[in-house]
Image (cartoon, rainbow, N blue to C red):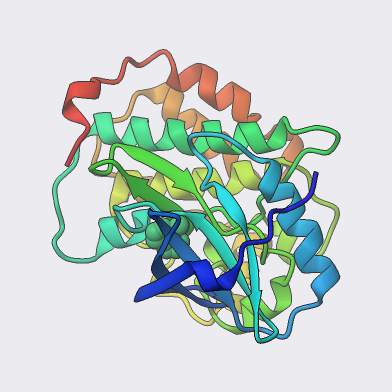
């Protein structure tokens, strides 16, 4: 399957809505639709761009930001994506206005992130591994009741991400930052750190810098976020998913489907989700 190429002339760019590691994101209109347009400003290898985007363009799931297509204008690549109206989960958690949320929201967001990742992991002929799951890459939609994973195409450029100090290290499984072979279980590690962030409303290892020091402590000293900072009374089996999920040995981590199975035991009150 090929990625749709979109004529840049049909895209009406408006406000800048974010800046990721690899490019600015704009709100835009395309075919009477509100879309998000990401301008890839690195001089990235086109073959890589194509390969990554091909995988993403096949993904069609409510918890994954949909990629409408790609546009090229004056040698610059633009990704034309589904627009999520609630901003990132990271901004929601840590920036003003700090709206209150409940355990119902925590379980809902954690479950939706797991469903999006499980979908990627189940894709054929190859599972897709996100490799950079974190609240910055989870967008909220529909009054923050729906969570959508974004930011795939660029995760290959790990070294440049790390040197940009992009706040990635805390979420990254040791086998990934060590450059070892990794599997879908690296996304489970990232999910676990995100789950801790949802339950603590704190940025993981905020006091530790630079990023390399975080990697070292996580890898060599077995550092993990403290349970003492959790502010929600989460059921024990969910806490166990989180602490099993950030084990150093990927084989000891649950799968995304295991996570979904446990979270599904807790009914979500859908009438109380919109914020
Ligand atoms: N920021 C980055 N990507 C976005 C998207 N698809 N929708 C809204 N805001 C975004």
Provide residue 75's location: percent of width, then percent of height: 70, 84
The one of 78 and 125 positioned closer to us in this rendering: 78
The structure residue drawn at horizontal position 55% and vertical position 36%, both measured from the top left corner, is 116
Asked whether, in this view, residue 98 is left or right of residue 200, the answer is left
Q: Quadrant of residue 238?
A: top left
**Residue located 53% across and 17% down the image:** 261
Of 180 and 13, the residue lying toward us: 13
Q: Determine whether, in the image, residue 219 is placed left or right of residue 61.
A: right
Q: Quadrant of the C terminus?
A: top left
Observer-nearest of 272 and 182: 272
Instruction: Say if 27 sits above or below 16 in the image.
Output: above
Q: Is residue 48 above or below residue 227?
A: below
Query: What is the quadrant of residue 35 in the picture?
Result: bottom left
**Residue 215 image-quadrant placement:** bottom right
Q: Quadrant of the N terminus?
A: top right
Q: Position of residue 176 (x, y in %)?
A: 73, 59
Residue 204 in sight in this render: no
Q: At x 54% / y 26%, what residue is drawn? A: 259
Does residue 70 sit above or below 13 in this rendering? above
Residue 172 at least partly seen: yes
Residue 117, position in %: x, y? 60, 38
Q: Position of residue 51 (x, y in %)?
A: 81, 58
Q: Regarding ligand 1, which quadrant of the image does it lie in?
A: bottom left
At a point 40% along the width and 46% down the height, the residue shown is 196
Q: Number of numbered discs present?
A: 0
Front-lying residue, 257 or 215: 257
């Amino acid at each position: 399957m090929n990625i749709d190429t979109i004529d840049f002339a049909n895209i009406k760019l408006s406000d800048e809505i974010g800046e990721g590691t690899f490019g600015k994101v704009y709100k835009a209109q395309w075919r009477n639709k509100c879309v998000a347009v990401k301008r890839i400003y690195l001089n990235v290898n086109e073959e890589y761009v194509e390969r990554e985007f091909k995988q993403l363009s096949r993904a069609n799931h409510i918890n994954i930001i949909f990629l409408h297509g790609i546009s090229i204008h004056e040698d610059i690549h633009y990704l034309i994506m589904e627009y999520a109206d609630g901003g990132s989960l990271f901004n929601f958690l840590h920036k003003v206005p700090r709206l209150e949320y409940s355990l119902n929201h925590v379980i809902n967001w954690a479950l939706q992130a797991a469903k999006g990742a499980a979908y990627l992991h189940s894709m054929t002929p190859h599972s897709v591994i996100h490799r950079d799951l974190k609240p910055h890459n989870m967008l909220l939609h529909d009054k923050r009741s729906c969570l959508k994973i974004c930011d795939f195409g660029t995760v290959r450029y790990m070294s440049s991400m790390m040197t940009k100090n992009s706040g990635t290290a805390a979420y990254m499984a040791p086998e990934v930052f060590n450059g070892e072979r990794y599997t879908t279980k690296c996304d489970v590690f990232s999910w676990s750190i995100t789950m801790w962030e949802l339950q603590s409303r704190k940025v993981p290892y905020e006091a530790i810098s630079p990023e390399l020091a975080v990697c070292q402590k996580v890898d060599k000293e077995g550092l993990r976020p403290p349970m003492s900072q959790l502010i929600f009374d989460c059921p024990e089996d969910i806490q166990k998913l989180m602490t099993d999920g950030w084990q150093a040995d990927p084989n000891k981590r649950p799968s995304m489907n295991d996570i979904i199975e446990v979270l599904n035991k807790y009914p979500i009150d859908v009438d109380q989700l919109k914020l």
